[in-house]
Image: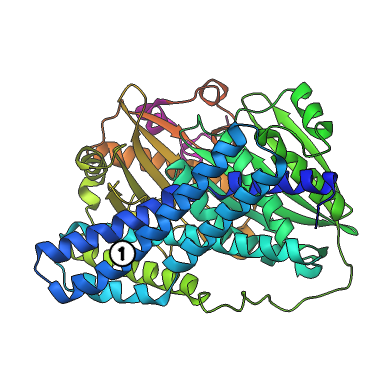
């Protein structure tokens, strides 16, 4: 059957965008490298039977990875040589199928026995130390697998579903977006899910997810130059509509660029970088919605999408795809939680380090063996200047550690920080405000009637000052540079400070808390 020229052109554009969207090669290579490391460690420690079993699986994995690489090379060559649309489409589909096959193999239950092999190795072995990084890669790979699965379904059927936008965003961010942002940005961009109102939409749910992912990619790219970026996603009911909003604090866009994005390349025929927003516009149109862009150069961009909701409708909680590999996602999450619990138990035995927390953070940075050295920490300081929470860890070579890994129960409730190098190799502190206002109030035991936005700003303002004082008193160099996310929100009165990208830590430590200010002034 010969495909109509317009349909062929659209199919080519969509396969191009999907391939551009996958970004899976590095993650698959990391998994192959991990299993090769397991094999080497089993050989070093003369665990022959386990090595024989593992080597058999490893060779099959390598074979699939080679097939995938060759398929990608053929596809890229076709695109670069301006081959016919038919050839590009066929080679693109061949590559996507090879990725699907590789992802499916990586998610096969046979790999469960790797855990028992790792149990035979010492804790200091490279394979054991890099297992967490492998799990994070597999989490991303599982997201790619399901995106391809849904893409294939979408091409074969005109899918229409009723789904709850709030539930969809929570699930998609947790299982796909989170891993992408962590790996893409070395955990320097924070994802915040703000107000998520429940509202039922009707349409192609998988296409909706692809649209959200495209908006996330654009936001992440816009914050590539940031040492500490914030990506905020929310949805709010407004009459018969629900407003989906994606906001970044990146480079921003000119009014001319915004105008171009809103009208350019309606046919989906053009450069890859322009396809993403065309897909967004077309998806919004399919949902009978509308969109707008607000942007300020060097301040950030907000995309607002208005979608008609099905008023009075409700849907049952969505179920995962019925597939034999679907339990892997839950398994990965369970393993990660077990590892976090084990780590917290281990660090608790070493003592809190409260008396030397500033020195400890700086020491973590100095001893980090990551390609880009650094340290991560969470800290809480009471109004009585007592440290009531302190967790920390240096960056590791094979793992992008997150605050959730440090403190799985309280990572949303405390001030979080990182110590990283600037381009000139000098270290800089990065303070991030609590991720959840509700969790912060709960942690601090604030009565319900006092949980106001202004009280939150006041409390975080004061705690940032106390934290600065405490870590200087316990060994952090006072002249070290510091950045504070949402600085204008918590220190709006200090205009000179708010105009600075970074400033010495001792400036923050010398500021007065609200409780220290003269009420008559």
| Span shown in magenta | 503-521
Nearest to the observer: residue 75 or residue 280: 75
Decide: is 197 above or below 516: below
Q: Tell me residue 459's x, y (percent).
A: 51, 48
On whether residue 59 falls in the magenta region, the answer is no
Furthest residue toward front = 1
Q: Tell me residue 14's x, y (percent).
A: 71, 48
Look at the image and tell me in which quarter the N terminus lies: bottom right
Q: Tell me residue 358's x, y (percent).
A: 26, 41
Decide: is 335 above or below 76: below
Mark 1 burial class by Cα count in 10 Å: few <14, some 14-19, many 20+: many
Q: Which residue is rendered at x = 73% and y = 79% of the image?
A: 316
Q: Which residue is rendered at x = 81% and y = 27% of the image?
A: 259
How many numbered dots are placed on residues in this image?
A: 1
Residue placed under numbered mark 1 in the picture = 58
Which structural element holds mark 1?
Answer: helix
| Residue 434 appearing in the image | no
Q: Quadrant of residue 449?
A: bottom right
Decide: is 232 above or below 116: above
Q: Which residue is rendered at x = 38% and y = 59% of the image?
A: 63
Nearest to the observer: residue 127 or residue 402: 127
| Residue 261 appearing in the image | yes
On whether residue 517 falls in the magenta region, the answer is yes
Nearest to the observer: residue 108 or residue 279: 108
Look at the image and tell me in which quarter the C terminus lies: top right
Nearest to the observer: residue 147 or residue 8: 8
**Color encoding of the figure:** rainbow
């Amino acid at each position: 059957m010969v495909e109509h020229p317009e349909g062929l052109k659209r199919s080519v554009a969509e396969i191009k965008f999907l391939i551009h969207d996958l970004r899976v090669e590095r993650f698959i290579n990391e998994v192959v490298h991990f299993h090769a490391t397991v094999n080497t460690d089993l050989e070093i420690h003369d665990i022959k039977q386990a090595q024989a079993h593992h080597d058999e699986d490893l060779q099959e994995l390598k074979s699939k990875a080679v097939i995938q690489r060759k398929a990608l090379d053929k596809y890229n060559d076709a695109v670069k040589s301006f081959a016919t649309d038919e050839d590009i489409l066929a080679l693109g589909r061949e590559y996507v199928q090879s990725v699907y096959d590789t992802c499916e193999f990586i998610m096969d239950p046979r790999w469960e026995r790797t855990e028992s092999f790792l149990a035979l190795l010492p804790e200091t072995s490279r394979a054991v130390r890099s297992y967490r990084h492998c799990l994070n890669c597999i989490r991303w790979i599982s997201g790619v697998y399901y995106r391809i699965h849904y893409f294939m379904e979408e091409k074969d059927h005109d899918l229409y579903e009723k789904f709850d936008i709030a539930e969809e965003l929570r699930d998609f961010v947790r299982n796909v977006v989170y891993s992408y942002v962590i790996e893409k940005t070395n955990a320097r961009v924070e994802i915040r899910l703000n107000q998520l109102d429940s509202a039922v939409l009707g349409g192609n749910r998988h296409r909706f997810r692809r649209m959200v992912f495209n908006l996330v990619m654009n936001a992440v790219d816009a914050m590539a130059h940031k040492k500490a970026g914030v990506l905020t996603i929310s949805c709010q009911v407004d009459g018969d509509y629900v407003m989906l909003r994606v906001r970044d604090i990146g480079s921003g866009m000119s009014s001319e660029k915004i105008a171009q994005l809103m009208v350019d390349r309606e046919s989906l025929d053009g450069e890859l970088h322009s396809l993403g927003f065309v897909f967004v516009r077309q998806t919004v149109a399919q949902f009978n919605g509308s969109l707008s862009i607000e942007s300020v150069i060097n301040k950030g961009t907000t995309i607002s999408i208005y979608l008609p909701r099905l008023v009075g409708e409700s849907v049952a909680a969505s179920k995962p795809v019925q597939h034999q590999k679907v339990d892997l996602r839950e398994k990965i999450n369970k393993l990660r939680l077990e590892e976090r619990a084990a780590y917290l138990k281990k660090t608790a035995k070493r003592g809190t380090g409260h008396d030397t927390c500033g020195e400890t953070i700086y020491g973590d940075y100095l001893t980090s063996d990551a390609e880009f050295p650094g340290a991560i920490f969470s800290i809480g300081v009471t109004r009585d200047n007592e440290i009531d929470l302190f967790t920390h860890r240096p960056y590791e070579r094979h793992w992008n550690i997150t605050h959730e890994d440090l403190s799985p129960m309280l990572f949303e409730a405390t001030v979080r920080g990182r110590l990283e190098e600037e381009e000139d190799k000098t270290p800089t502190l990065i303070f991030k405000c609590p991720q959840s206002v509700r969790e912060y109030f709960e942690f601090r035991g604030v009565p319900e009637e006092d949980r106001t936005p202004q009280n939150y700003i006041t409390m975080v303002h004061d705690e940032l000052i106390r934290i600065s004082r405490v870590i200087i008193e316990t060994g952090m160099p006072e002249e070290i540079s510091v950045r504070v996310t949402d600085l204008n929100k918590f220190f709006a009165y200090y205009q000179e400070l708010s105009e600075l990208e970074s400033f010495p830590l001792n400036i923050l430590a010398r500021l007065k808390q609200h409780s220290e200010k003269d009420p008559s002034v």
